[in-house]
Amino acid sequence: MTNARQFVSDRLEISTYLLEVEAAKYRDICSQYKYMRKIRGDGNCFYRALCFGHLESLLQNDRCLTRFKDTVIQSGRELLAAGFEESSFKHLLDMFVGVVEQCEADGQGDSLLQLFNEKTTSDSLVQYLRLLTSAYLQNHADFFSHFVEAPSLKVYCTQEVETMSMECDHVDILALSEALGVSVHIASVEGGAGQHLAHHIIPEGAETSLHLLYKTAHYDILYPQHCR
């Protein structure tokens, strides 16, 4: 059973959920995916889903986990380059690195799930990812400013990206994907050709081990049929 108070649920049989999805698209989801994890719908679902899903996919790969930890540590430079004071994010970064190190130490999905359902830890990870996304957008303003509808990119980042519980847009997903070197496959119930889901690979053409379901401005984690 899923617990409404959880930020990230246990892994669930997908056939038990999504019954409100249009029948044809429901069949399309079930033909491709076996399990899902529900993410709390609090406006932070994309950041939480990406972070949990990616770390979970690395649990059995020590080399990739260590490489990702190095990426996270180095990501502090992105924030400094965008003008953030180190004192404003160091505790968040330290907590993020600490979570990755706990994954290295025990390699257990149960420990990761417990960490993500502790509010302080879970929200700190989300807050850091929001700051990193903001920093990456600002440091690459020549590209990203064309895709943002706001008085300025800085205003957009302050109001829409750095603020907790604000839903993310495609431009934020692309920026965070590039900042962390994490690719993501989004299966969307919205749009798509007739009876089928719409599929988006970010960045385009990448190999992905992280699959998310997008439905009504919300993201959950998907696990393909071949998943153990």
Image (cartoon, helix red, strand yellow):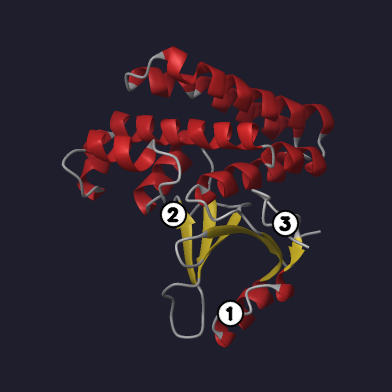
Left or right: 218 in relation to 59: left
User: Which sits earlier in the primary sequence, circle 3 or circle 2?
Assistant: 3
Left or right: 38 in relation to 155: right
Q: In terms of depth relative to the viewer, which is nearer, 112 or 27?
A: 112
The C terminus sits in image quarter: bottom right
User: Which sits earlier in the primary sequence, circle 2 or circle 1?
Assistant: 1
Instruction: From this view, report whether residue 113 is shown above or below residue 204.
Output: above
Left or right: 172 in relation to 195: left
Q: Which mark is residue 3?
A: 3
Q: Which mark is residue 20?
A: 1
Q: Residue furthest front?
A: 5
Identify the residue at horizontal 58%, vertical 86% (top origin).
23
> At which x and y percent is residue 9?
71, 54
Q: Is residue 49 visible?
A: yes
Q: Secondary structure at mark 3?
A: loop
Looking at the rendering, which quadrant does residue 224 occupy?
bottom right
| C-alpha separation, residue under disc 3 versus residue under disc 2 | 35 Å
The N terminus sits in image quarter: bottom right
Identify the residue at horizontal 39%, vertical 35% (top origin).
162
**For discs 2 and 1, the disc positioned in front in the rendered view:** 1
Q: Residues within 10 Å of mark 3 (few under 14, many from 20)?
A: few
Amino acid carrying label 2: it is Glu
Q: Residues within 10 Å of mark 2 (few under 14, many from 20)?
A: few
User: Which residue is the site of mark 2?
Assistant: 204
User: Which sits earlier in the primary sequence, circle 3 or circle 1?
Assistant: 3
Instruction: From this view, report whether residue 109 is shown above or below residue 185.
Output: above
Q: Given contact means CB atoms under 8 Å apart, are the residues at marks 3 and 2 in contact? A: no
> At which x and y percent is residue 139?
31, 29
